[in-house]
């Protein structure tokens, strides 16, 4: 076994791990960052950008939300079931993190365009303009994966500071002595076991979104049956289990819940076309929420999750499809505003390829048979819904009358959705210093956790009204851990 010595070991080099490694190195510490994959960045490379409160970008357009106000919004959202000190420190740090990233050459696009939004569409009426998207390399349209430029710049900065990023080298086990964590056992790319001694260890392994067994155990959902979440390869709960093995308290593991169709990236625009306020029903054929609220993907995921079979069906007829092709979307989503330009092509491809979650049928009877919807229940729903559409008033949920379009004219189009998730949250309990806690609430000396391994600040649902929160928590908790680990090491030299 080969032995290495360093001040800090960071286990995983995704967004939170890179933030921790850079910060520790900026404090003059030697840092080894272990990364099990062939590249750095992790799940963050799929995203758009982090939240921040009180930046110069916001001040320039007169947007003056304060960290104190964001803190209170967040805590009321979570019903004060989370660590208030951690949340407060995190929001107060967020503006400086944008400047910190800009010093590395990261450029951001901040947009404060707020159009009039009916109160019923609370998903767009309530959100604060907190997200700072990373500027696309070509200066073009914002979208998924633009944040890869940020993680690349961070990896370059880490190497400039002397961080030893060891790729294809997973951390396997924590070394604990006399109640303190003093290092990590890792496995090198050539299979050699490494004993890395350190003054502090920071866990940043990204949760367990790629571990169906842990997901089933902690959420009850079965991946591939009633859950179709993103699975970032390697995010299998390594850091969580390593910490549990040395006495860390077992925090609740939750999913960053939203909703999606299976294999949604292969049917990107087709899914976007059905994220509209048309008719949504469950397997019983019953409506279960006012469809003008579906833009909040997180609360919609909650609603779908409690339906029979953890699933729902979105239905439109040919008249509604014709309307959308002519007039465009009602609700904007990540898929963009032009989804109906692609509808015919992607619908045809889905049918030709036998995609089992999209249906085009000539009768309601045929639709119910193919999709597994209760025929009597859907017929009863349609009788009331279509009558309400004629009257211009939703007698069940008071949906905005502008979105009341009947389902009468064949062919009928339907897509089936399930709970999805961007990954997992939590598993490790930390304090405001990001120290990992034992069951008695006291910290395990020398052990820190950041990012989604430790993100237990939302309550039961991601706070949609403060966009960019998860990426920001990864960045800021990483910086906090790097700083606190440096203080701990200095005091114990």
Image (cartoon, rainbow, N blue to C red):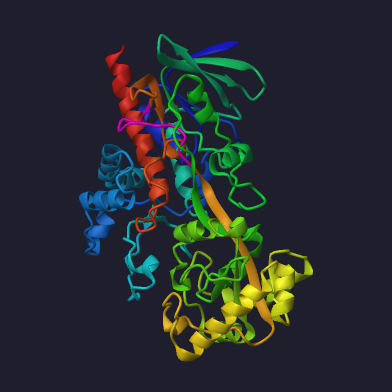
Q: Position of residue 243 (x, y in %)?
A: 48, 24
Residue lying furthest bottom in this view? 390
Stretch of the chain drawn in magenta: 425-436
Above or below for 331 versus 86 = below
x 48%, y 68%: residue: 289
Is residue 103 shown above or below 381?
above
Which residue is pictured at 64% across the width and 25% down the height?
189
Quick check: 363 above or below 21? Answer: below
Quadrant holding the N terminus: top right
Dividing the picture into quadrants, the one containing residue 30 is: top left
* Residue 73 appears in the figure: yes
Which residue occupies the foreground of this view, 95 or 139? 95
List x then y, in percent, for residue 45: 51, 47
Front residue of 5 and 283 = 283
Q: Position of residue 115 (x, y in %)?
A: 34, 74
Is 428 in the magenta?
yes
- Of 73 and 281, nearer the camera is 281
Q: How many marks?
A: 0
193 or 415: nearer the viewer = 415
Q: Is residue 168 left or right of residue 141?
A: right
Return the x and y of residue 269 as percentages of the image width and height.
60, 69
- Residue 425 as seen in the image, left or right of residue 443: right
- Assign the magenta stretch its main secondary structure: loop
Say which residue appears at 60% left-offset and 41% top-offset. 216
- Vertical side of 492 occupied by 427: above or below: below
| Residue 65 lies in the magenta stretch | no
Note whether residue 136 is visible.
Answer: no
Q: Residue at x 67, y 22 (%)?
A: 190
Q: Quarter holding the C terminus?
A: top left
């Amino acid at each position: 076994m080969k032995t290495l010595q360093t001040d800090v070991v960071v286990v995983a080099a995704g967004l939170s791990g890179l933030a921790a490694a850079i910060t520790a190195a900026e404090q003059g510490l030697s840092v080894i960052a272990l990364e099990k994959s062939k590249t750095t960045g992790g799940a963050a490379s799929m995203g758009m950008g982090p939240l921040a409160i009180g930046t110069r970008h916001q001040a320039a357009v007169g947007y003056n939300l304060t960290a104190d106000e964001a803190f209170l919004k967040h805590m009321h959202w979570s019903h004060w079931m989370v660590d208030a000190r951690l949340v407060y420190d995190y929001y107060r740090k967020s503006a400086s993190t944008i400047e910190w990233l800009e010093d590395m050459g990261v450029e951001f696009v901040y947009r404060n365009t707020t159009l009039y939004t009916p109160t019923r569409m609370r998903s767009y009426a309530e959100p604060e303009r907190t997200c700072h998207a990373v500027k696309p390399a070509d200066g073009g349209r914002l979208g998924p994966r633009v944040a890869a430029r940020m993680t690349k710049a961070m990896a370059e900065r880490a190497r400039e500071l002397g961080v030893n990023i060891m790729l294809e080298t997973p951390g396997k086990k924590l070394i604990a002595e006399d109640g303190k964590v003093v290092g990590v056992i890792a496995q090198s790319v050539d299979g050699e076991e490494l004993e890395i001694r350190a003054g502090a260890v920071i866990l940043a392994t990204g949760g367990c979104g790629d571990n169906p067994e842990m997901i089933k155990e902690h959420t009850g959902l079965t991946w591939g049956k009633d859950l179709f979440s993103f699975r970032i390869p390697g995010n299998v709960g390594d850091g969580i289990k390593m910490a549990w093995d040395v006495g860390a308290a077992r925090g609740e593991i939750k999913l960053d819940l939203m909703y999606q169709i299976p294999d949604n990236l292969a049917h990107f625009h087709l899914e976007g076309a059905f994220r509209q306020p048309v008719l949504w029903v469950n397997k019983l054929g019953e409506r279960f929420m006012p469809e003008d609220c579906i833009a909040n993907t997180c609360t919609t995921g909650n609603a779908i999750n409690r339906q029979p079979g953890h699933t729902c069906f979105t239905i439109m007829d040919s008249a509604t499809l014709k309307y959308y092709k002519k007039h465009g979307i009602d609700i904007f989503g990540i898929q963009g505003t032009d989804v109906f330009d692609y509808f015919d092509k992607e619908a045809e491809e889905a049918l030709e390829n036998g995609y089992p979650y999209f249906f085009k049928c000539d009768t309601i009877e045929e639709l119910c048979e193919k999709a597994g919807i209760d025929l009597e229940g859907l017929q009863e729903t349609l009788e009331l819904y279509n009558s309400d559409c004629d009257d211009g008033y939703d007698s069940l949920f008071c949906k905005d009358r502008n979105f009341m379009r009947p389902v009468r004219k064949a062919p009928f189009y339907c897509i089936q959705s399930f709970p999805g998730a961007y990954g997992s949250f939590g598993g490790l309990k930390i304090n405001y210093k990001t120290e990992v806690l034992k069951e008695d609430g006291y910290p395990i000396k020398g052990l820190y956790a950041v990012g989604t391994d430790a993100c237990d600040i939302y309550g039961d649902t991601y706070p949609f009204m403060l966009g960019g929160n998860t990426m920001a928590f990864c960045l800021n908790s990483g910086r906090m851990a790097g700083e606190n680990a440096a203080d701990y090491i200095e005091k114990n030299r």
